[in-house]
Amino acid sequence: MRTVFRFLVAGLLLAGLVACGPSKPPALPFKGTDIAGVDFGGDFTLTDQTGKSRSLSDYKGKVVALFFGYTHCPDVCPTTMFEFANAMKQLGAGAKNVQVLFVTVDPERDTPAVLASYVPHFDPSFVGLTGNPGQIEKVTSQFKIVAQKQPTEGGGYTVDHSAGSYLFDREGRLRAYEPYGAPAGQLANDIQLLLR
């Protein structure tokens, strides 16, 4: 009887500890992939297109969409940025509570000035972020982004890179992964779920 009592007490204590620990946010019916509770990501600080230092945590209180790309990208990056721009239009007044961040994977070419002429073209509220190669490598590693230069004829290069996007809730928690090719309607749907 004492053994059963000890197991009962131990079980109640364990349940209490679990209840006191950090709770996983409730599941939402995302059209993308629900990744709440993953053990990667985290805050970072880079330089925006105006030369100002910006951290991911600066945008707490907004839903954040995080995309990694580069301005010389011929197809994936502009397509994704156009989809986010269209998603913002679909969100209407709710768009003011959303921040799209474009982190370059090509810091050698994507200076703040280059980002300033590229990122706001899609939507004036979008923010482009860059840094030195070491800073960019650290952030891409944090978010499990693969980026590799591919030489082209004439001495130039392209960058093969992971093409999905991440969504964060207003508390700054990583919540959803949106694959490349996700249409504006899907992005708007999943962002709207996080705005509620």
Image (spheres, helix red, strand yellow):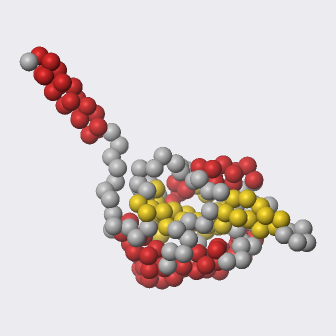
Q: Is residue 95 visible?
A: no
- Residue 55, image x and y in percent? 58, 55
Residue nearer the viewer, 150 or 171: 150
Q: Residue 33 sits in which quadrant?
A: bottom left
Q: Residue at x 58, y 80 (%)?
A: 82
Image coordinates for residue 11, horizontal then vertical, percent:
21, 30
Q: Nearer the viewer, residue 183 or 119?
A: 183
In the picture as drawn, the residue positioned furthest to the top comes out as 2
The residue shown at (48%, 63%) is 177
Instruction: Give left or right: position of 149 versus 38.
Output: right
Residue found at x 67% / y 77%: 75
**Does 182 appear above or below 112?**
below
Side (left or right) of 2 relative to 126: left
Q: Quadrant of residue 173?
A: bottom left
- Asked whether residue 134 appears in the rendered view, the answer is yes
- The quadrant in which residue 2 appears is top left
Query: Relative to residue 140, is residue 35 drawn left or right?
Result: left
Q: Quadrant of the N terminus?
A: top left
Quadrant occupied by the C terminus: bottom left
Query: Does residue 26 lie above or below 102 as drawn?
Result: above
Image label count: 0
Horizontally, is 105 left or right of 16 in the view?
Answer: right
Q: Residue at x 57, y 53 (%)?
A: 143
